[in-house]
Image (spheres, grey):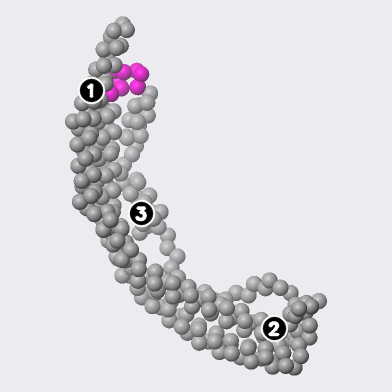
C-alpha cells in the first residue's frame, strides 16, 4: 500500500513536470513574446499623449479658478469692512480711520473689476476644456481597447495554464490534492476573463464615473467673526 502511494506520487510528479515543461512553459514564453511585441511601453506613451493636452488645459482651468475665488473673497471681505466700518487690526477689531476706508474702497473697486474680468477668462477656459472632451475620450478609449486586447490574451493564457496544471494533478484520483483542486475547479468554473476586464473598465477605464470640470462659483465660508 505504501509502495502504491509512493508510485502514485511519482506518477503525479512526472505528469506535472511533463505538463509544465511541454505545455505550460511554452505558453508562458509565447505570452511574454506576444506582450513584448505589442509594445506595452508604447501603449503607456499613447496614454500620456492623449492626456497631455487635456492635463495642460485642466491645469489652466484650476489655476484661473483659484485666482477667481481669491478675487471674490477679497471683494467680499472688503465690502464687509466698508459696510460695518470695522476691520481686523493688531489688537483685534477696530473702527476704520478715513484713510483706511479710502484704501479699502480702492481695494474693493479694483478686485470687483478683477472678479468680472477673471470670471470671463474662467468661463472661457472651461469652454475650451469641454470642447476637447470628445477627442480626449476617443483617444483614451482607443488606447484602453489596445490594453484590453493584450490583457484578454494574457488572462486567457494564464487560465489555460491553471487548467492544464489541474488536469496534470488529476485530483479525482489523488485525495491528497482533491480539496485544493476542487476549490480551484470551482473558481475556474465561475471565472470569465470578461469579469476582470469589466472591472478594470469600471474602475480605471471608460466605464468609470466621470466628473467633468465645470464653473464653480465662490462660496463664502467665514473663518473669522469681526463682531465684539
Q: Quadrant of residue 138?
A: bottom left
Q: Residues within 10 Å of mark 1 (few under 14, many from 20)?
A: some
Residue sitting farthest toward the front: 90
Question: Which segment did they paint magenta?
Answer: 169-178
Q: Is 156 in front, or is 92?
A: 92
Q: What is the secondary structure assignment of the residue under circle 3?
A: helix
Count of numbered badges drawn on the protein = 3
Q: Quadrant of residue 70?
A: bottom right
Residue at the image point whose x is 20% and y is 46% from the top? 33
3 or 2: tag closer to the N-terminus: 2
Residue 80: numbered disc? 2
State yes or no: residue 158 in magenta: no
The reply to whether residue 215 is in sight is no
2 or 1: tag closer to the N-terminus: 1
- For label 3, the residue is 201
Q: Name the mark nearer the viewer: 3 or 2.
A: 2
Q: CA distance from mark 3 to mark 1?
A: 39 Å
- For label 1, the residue is 15
* Cβ atoms at labels 3 and 2 below 8 Å apart: no
Residue at the image point whose x is 66% and y is 84% from the top? 78
Residue at the image point whose x is 28% and y is 39% from the top? 158
Residue sitting farthest toward the right: 228
Q: Residues within 10 Å of mark 2 (few under 14, many from 20)?
A: some
Residue at the image point whose x is 56% and y is 89% from the top? 113
Amino acid at each position: 500500500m505504501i509502495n502504491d502511494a509512493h508510485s502514485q506520487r511519482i506518477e503525479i510528479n512526472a505528469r506535472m513536470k511533463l505538463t509544465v515543461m511541454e505545455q505550460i512553459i511554452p505558453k508562458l514564453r509565447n505570452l511574454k513574446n506576444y506582450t513584448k511585441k505589442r509594445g506595452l511601453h508604447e501603449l503607456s506613451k499613447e496614454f500620456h499623449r492623449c492626456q497631455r493636452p487635456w492635463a495642460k488645459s485642466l491645469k489652466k482651468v484650476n489655476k484661473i479658478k483659484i485666482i477667481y475665488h481669491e478675487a471674490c473673497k477679497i471683494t467680499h471681505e472688503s465690502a464687509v469692512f466698508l459696510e460695518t466700518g470695522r476691520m481686523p487690526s493688531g489688537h483685534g477689531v477696530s473702527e476704520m480711520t478715513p484713510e483706511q476706508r479710502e484704501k479699502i474702497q480702492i481695494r474693493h473697486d479694483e478686485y470687483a473689476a478683477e472678479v468680472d474680468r477673471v470670471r470671463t477668462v474662467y468661463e472661457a477656459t472651461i469652454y475650451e476644456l469641454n470642447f476637447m472632451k470628445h477627442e480626449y475620450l476617443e483617444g483614451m478609449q482607443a488606447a484602453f481597447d489596445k490594453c484590453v486586447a493584450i490583457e484578454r490574451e494574457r488572462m486567457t493564457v494564464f487560465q489555460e495554464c491553471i487548467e492544464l496544471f489541474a488536469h496534470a494533478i488529476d485530483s479525482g484520483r489523488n485525495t491528497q490534492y482533491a480539496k485544493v483542486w476542487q476549490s480551484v475547479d470551482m473558481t475556474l468554473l465561475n471565472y470569465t476573463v470578461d469579469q476582470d476586464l469589466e472591472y478594470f473598465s469600471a474602475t480605471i477605464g471608460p466605464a468609470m464615473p466621470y466628473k467633468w470640470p465645470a464653473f464653480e462659483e465662490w462660496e463664502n465660508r467665514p473663518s473669522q467673526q469681526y463682531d465684539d
